[in-house]
Each structure stands twice: as C-alpha cells, then as structure tokens.
Amino acid sequence: MRSSNPVFSRRGFSRDNGGYAGFGAQHQQAGTNPYATNPYAADAATGMPQAPARTDVMTIDDVVSRTAMTLGTVILTATIAWIAMPVDPANVNKSYGIAVGAALVALVLGLVQSFKRKASPPVILGYAAFEGFFLGVLSSATSTYFSAGVVIQAVLGTMCVFASVLFAYKMRWIRVTRRFYGFVMAAAMGFMLLMVANLLFSVFAGGDGLGFRSGGLGILFGIVGVVLGACFLALDFKQVEDGITYGAPRDEAWLAAFGLTVTLVWIYLELLRLFQILSGDD
C-alpha cells in the first residue's frame, strides 16, 4: 500500500537490502503478506518473529518521537513567523511574499523527500520549518482580518479530528482495505483537480474563480476536505501499524512522521478556510 499522503502519494515505506518489502510495493493478491521476504517479519501462525529480533526496527516510540520533532518544528517556526512577520497594512505585502516563498521551498523539499528511497531527516525537518513559517503568516493574517478565534478553532478542530480518527481506528470502526485506499485516492485526486481549476479561474478571471472556496460551495468543499484528511489519517495509521508489525527499519519512522505532518497540515488548512467562511457568514 503506497503512501497515504494527500500530496505526496507516491512516497511510502521503502524496500531495503535486508528484504523489508515496503509500502511502495504493490500487493500481488489481496490478503497476502507483502513482507514475507523479511526474515524479521511476524509469522502468520504464531505471531512471533521468524528470526531473532533486531534492535534497529521501527517502534511506536520512534514514530511518536519523530512526529513530535516534526510537528514541534512546524509549531515553533509558525510562532516565530507570527511574531516576526507583521501583517498590518504597512507590512502585509512583504510578509505575504516571504510566506509564499517559504511555501514554495516547503513544496520542493516535500517533493524531494517523496521521491527519495530513504528518509532524510534534514529534508523532513526543513520541510516542517518552511511549512510552519508559511502557516504562521497565513494564520496571523486570518486572525487579524477575519476573526481572532478562527485559528484557535482550527487548531482545536485538527486535534479533535486526529483523536477521533485514532480512536475509531483502534476500535476497528474504520477498516483500511484496498477498496478504501482506492476510493480515498480517487476522491482526493478529483478534489485537488477541482481546487486547481478554481485557482486557475481565480487567477485569470478574477474573483473567487468557480466559487469552490466561498459561500455555500466553500463550506461544502471545506467539509469534504476535512473528511478526506480524516481518511488519510486512517491510511497513515495503517502504514504505521503494518510497519511496526512487519519489521520496518527504524529510519522509516521519519517517513511516518512526514506523512502524519502533511496530513495534519492539510486538515488544519481545510478547517481554517472552513471556519473563515463561517465567520464571514455571521
């Protein structure tokens, strides 16, 4: 099963020389173990490793610590940008320009990581730093020009979505199957194509393009975006669970952190836009 990232869907856990078959590999048959060539994978009958346990395999603590570092970098740089890059009328254009530049750098770094065979912590943390800077300026502008409470609502909403999906996944209310994966990826592709079309229309025709980001349609597409983000979280959790079960190398925890961070940023941006529209309708 490939990466569940809504933007970097090509990147998944990789195949290394030790025989670990990663998430980039296609399953030959539904229900088969794609990691059977890994001598450290759990035996299907006993649940025990087929070979003596290694010390360099990924654990949940590795995923939690790397994710905390990556998200912590996003939060730190977002806070710095909020304080250091004012969005008052005298400085807003300069702040926006720098923020757009940071977003482009983050995009490039994210693409670089998505096409690398192995995780690169400097690239991932660099992505988090520049993404955080962009989010800090954007959040500050949203709070200043729309509603001071929108940012807090979006942050709390993102936390609630994460906790809810994690609980539902642990309770097995959400079952990640190949059909689920295919549906989510197809829906995300259609969603992003519509957003790109809307952006192009807004650039060349002015206004809000096709109207997908304002009014009633904006609310609808905001909800769809949040639901898609929640589905990607479920795919992320499945990847982490399979990686731990089948003995992914410890470095792959950075890929898990990268995927979770991109998904949470996606959800935060969708909620920020949604609450912004709702605050304007009051």
Image: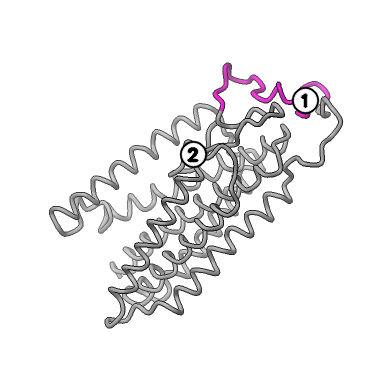
Secondary element type, mark 2: helix
Residue 224 spot, x, y in % from top left: 38, 47
> Which numbered tag is attached to residue 188?
none
Residue plotted at (50% across, 50% down): 263
Which image quarter holds the C terminus? Answer: bottom left
Amino acid type at mark 2 = Phe
Magenta highlight range: 25-46
The numbered mark, 1 or 2, whose residue comes first in the sequence reads 1
Residue plotted at (46% across, 58% down): 268
> Which numbered tag is attached to residue 115?
2
Residue where numbered disc 1 is placed: 39
Instruction: Out of 185 and 165, give the one closest to the viewer.
Output: 185
Residue at the outermost right position: 52
Secondary element type, mark 1: loop
Q: CA distance from mark 1 to mark 2?
A: 27 Å
User: Magenta segment: does it hold 250?
Assistant: no
In the rendered view, tell whether residue 234 sits above or below residue 108.
Answer: above
In the rendered view, tell whether residue 174 sits above or below residue 131.
Answer: above
